[in-house]
Amino acid sequence: MNLDFTPEQEAFRAELRAFLEQNLPERLSDKVRSGQRLAKEDYEEWHAILNGRGWLAGNWPKGHGGAGWDAVERHIFEEETTAAGAPRIVPFGLAMLGPVLQKFGSKEQQEHWLPRILDGTDWWCQGYSEPGAGSDLASVKTTAVREGDHYIVNGQKTWTTLGQYADMIFCLVRTSKEGKPQEGISFLLIDMTSPGIEVRPIVLLDGEPEVNEVFFDNVKVPVENLVGEENKGWTYAKYLLTHERTNIAGVGFANAGLENLKRIARLEQSRGRPLIEDPLFAARIAEVEIALMAMATTNLRVVSAAAAGQAPGAESSMLKVKGTVIRQEINALTREAVGPYAMPFAHETLEAGSNAEPVGPDYALPATAQYFNNRKLSIYGGSNEVQRTIIAKTILEL
């Protein structure tokens, strides 16, 4: 991705590249590039390396232990780490809960939870979606009834990504049924080891139990784990979602996926010549690359506008839609480039230490796995259909 950067920004890029070359374990980058499943320990190892350099929470201010990067520096970080094959930074504590606590949490909550997010003491997951309340979060039915100095929580969350690893979950819960649905929602921090919590895995198309159902049966949660005010959680939820949807644009991941697509298209043949020389296929690659360049520029502009601490508005929805469409198109083209080797999909070969024999070249299986897994991109974080409605109402005033 060729964008213009200042000498200072290019110096930061050079520093980052040197850091990655010296500190990114080859074992981890090999797993990422080969499409193998990453274990909890892999993510924790990379988080600890970044935290040791002060680069784990690039979006946090330095006063809270973050790197205090501006939008362009965060863009460069994502671009370089994905290009190097680094594991992604798990976003739930760092990119979602952290900003909410910094803006709406009490001083005590900030002093307690923020350091634990950075040092890996707590692994967070997100408790927003429910059966019947996915993109329509105002319909959440999980209840939290106050009894003395505790809330009693009952209900169910679903599509809880990496919830099988988490020891904490931030939840939207219903604390009142009065007034509009949005007016009775609160934002609660819940210990996943509490009695009455059950986690059940959901196996996705690529064979990985990445998401989960989480059930709450009379779970006791201390009142001090309420973020902000009771029944004001909808405000905090919207603030979090705008950050989530901006990050979902995934410019760095799209860049890495595009480069991988070009590599495969140079290796695969069409009528005796490299596929990348086929005029129709080359035109489709060029089309998605142009769209990616435009989105990268827009992403920088939108996140820059939020640098002062203000959450972006409907522009986040635009980035969410465009980013997921582009990444899915790259996945589709990559799977198409692999050709017939995309058909025999044995997901168990992606497990570390597996003795299963892959079919076809080493890039065939990851291409298919990513295609299957990333069908979710246009659904989570608010489905693309809902985001288009937000755009129509708030920007086009339709």
Image: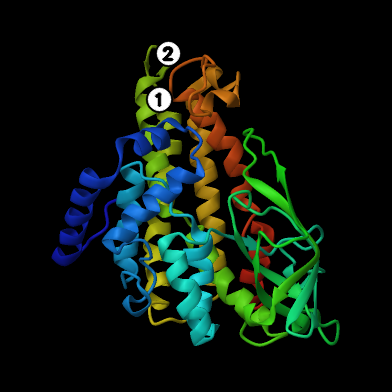
The one of 384 and 202 positioned closer to us in this rendering? 202
Q: What residue appears at the point 43 percent right and 81 percent down from the top-left corner?
A: 309
Q: What residue appears at the point 79 percent right and 80 percent down from the top-left corner?
A: 175
**Residue 45 image offset from top left, x and y in percent:** 39, 48
Q: Is residue 269 above or below residue 207?
A: above
**Residue 183 image offset from top left, x and y in percent:** 76, 84
Residue located beneath label 1 in the image: 278
Crowdedness near tag 2: few (<14), some (14–19) or many (≥20) residues, C-alpha within 10 Å: few
Crowdedness near tag 1: few (<14), some (14–19) or many (≥20) residues, C-alpha within 10 Å: some
Q: Secondary structure at mark 2?
A: loop
Please, which residue is most extreme toward the top here?
272
How many numbered dots are placed on residues in this image?
2
**Residue 326 image offset from top left, x and y in percent:** 50, 48
Q: What amino acid type is highlighted by mark number 2?
A: Arg
Q: Quadrant of the C terminus?
A: bottom right
Q: Quadrant of residue 145?
A: bottom right
- Marks 2 and 1, Cα distance to the nearest angstrom? 9 Å
- Can the viewer see residue 335? no
Q: Quadrant of residue 10?
A: bottom left
Q: What amino acid type is highlighted by mark number 1?
A: Asp
Q: Secondary structure at mark 1?
A: loop
- Dots 2, 1 in contact, CB < 8 A: yes
Q: Is residue 76 above or below residue 176?
A: above
**Residue 187 image offset from top left, x and y in percent:** 66, 76
Checking the image for residue 261, the label placed there is none
Q: What residue appears at the point 52 percent right and 15 percent down from the top-left corner?
A: 359
The one of 261 and 360 positioned closer to us in this rendering? 360
Left or right position of 124 against 284: right
Left or right position of 279 against 376: left
Residue located beneath label 2 in the image: 271
Please tell me which of labels 2 and 1 falls first in the chain: 2
